[in-house]
Amino acid sequence: MTAPEVQDYVGFDTITQQMERKFLKRGFNLNVILVGESGMGKSTLVNSIFSTHLVDSQGRRTAQEVIRKTTEILPVTQTLDENGVRVRLTIIDTPGFGDQCNNEGCWVQVIKYIKDQHAAYLERELKPQRDRIINDTRVHACLYFLNPGSRGLRPLDVEVLKRLTEVTNVIPVIAKSDSMTLDERTLFKRRVKEEMAFHRISVYPYASEDDDDEDRMLNASIRELVPFAVVGSEETIDVDDKPVRGRRHGWGVINIFDESHCDFVHLRNFMLRTHLSDLVEVTAQRHYEQFRTSQLRQIKELRAQQAAAAAAAAGGSGSSQPPVAPLPHQPMTQA
């Protein structure tokens, strides 16, 4: 008989395969909100990014249509499958945003929606018998559309970006950048970068202590491109007998997949191929965690106030009163 062979291989390195199988079986959620005035091509861009028709334009189709007087929130959810990976994708459009002469407060409904998703997640998380898997409706990314006709950030942009960056991962894009020359686009990008630095507006991706050299180099290259000069199109055009996804102009054709024409490919790769997992993770660890900490602190303060009030009432009446039950968590009602 021969001695049994010694098995040195333990096998814990298969955990990534185990996690992948479980992840593929469960799928994941991705929630993206589109913020920008009407006519900026928001629906077309997001349909182009995911290479399928997900949402219809909510803008006015005729001059006779009534302009929305308030910002509306219109989420659309679809399940997509790519090579066995399933994503439950929710696109949230915001028709009416920035369409008025006086746009004071047009951001309120947008901020409220984002915070309400945090609140709903926290409420489900605090249940005594919570679900094994909590449905994640938290907003993971915000595409903020800058008007190419402006000379940089408008006062409205500054106000909204300051508020949005506090609650979600903001990715600014120059809408319909084919309406600008390359020199105009370069100047516009430089002005936006300078104004964001001046107003201390920090957009995604953020620097992290966990980043290695490769992460830092990748993020630095992405920050050079921000704001992304994008063009979206669902139309296929023949150029030299080859199908091209793009837009036709009198002076030629814009190919949205040509990196010399626009930043569409860079934006798509950034959102889906390099930073998709990080968008979800940063939402949970940064934005949701800040909201959660703030809400739990408020609940703790309410309990202390109720306990003090109950003690004072008990001392005045000479009888012992039971402590007042804590108020259930309520979604925030204003931005």
Image: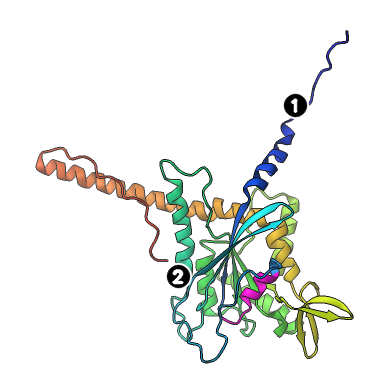
Q: Residue at x 50, y 51 (%)?
A: 289
Q: Relative to 92, does residue 57 appear above or below in the rendering?
A: below
Q: Position of residue 80 (x, y in %)?
A: 66, 59
Classify the position of the C terminus by image quarter: bottom left
Classify the position of the N terminus by image quarter: top right
Q: Is residue 227 visible?
A: no
Q: Could you tell me which secondary element the residue under label 1 belongs to?
A: loop
Question: How dense is the environment of label 2, judged by Cα within 10 Å: few (below 14), some, or many (20 and up)?
Answer: some
Along the horizontal axis of the image, is 330 left or right of 82? left
Q: Relative to 128, does residue 254 appear above or below in the rendering?
A: below
Give the number of callouts: 2
Query: What residue did someone put label 1 on?
Result: 10
Whether the residues at callouts 1 and 2 have beta carbons within 8 Å, the answer is no
How did the renderer colour the structure?
rainbow
For this orientation, the residue located farthest to the top is: 1
The amino acid on which the numbered mark 1 sits, given as a three-letter code, is Val
Location of residue 149 by image quarter: bottom right
Question: How dense is the environment of label 1, judged by Cα within 10 Å: few (below 14), some, or many (20 and up)?
Answer: few
**Distance between the alpha carbons at the discs numbered 1 and 2:** 54 Å
Q: Which residues are magenta?
A: 37-48
Q: Position of residue 275 (x, y in %)?
A: 68, 57
Residue 11 painted magenta: no
Query: What residue did someone put label 2 on?
Result: 109
Check residue 283 in the rendering and tell me which mark sits there, or answer none. none
Q: Relative to 313, does residue 173 appear above or below in the rendering?
A: below
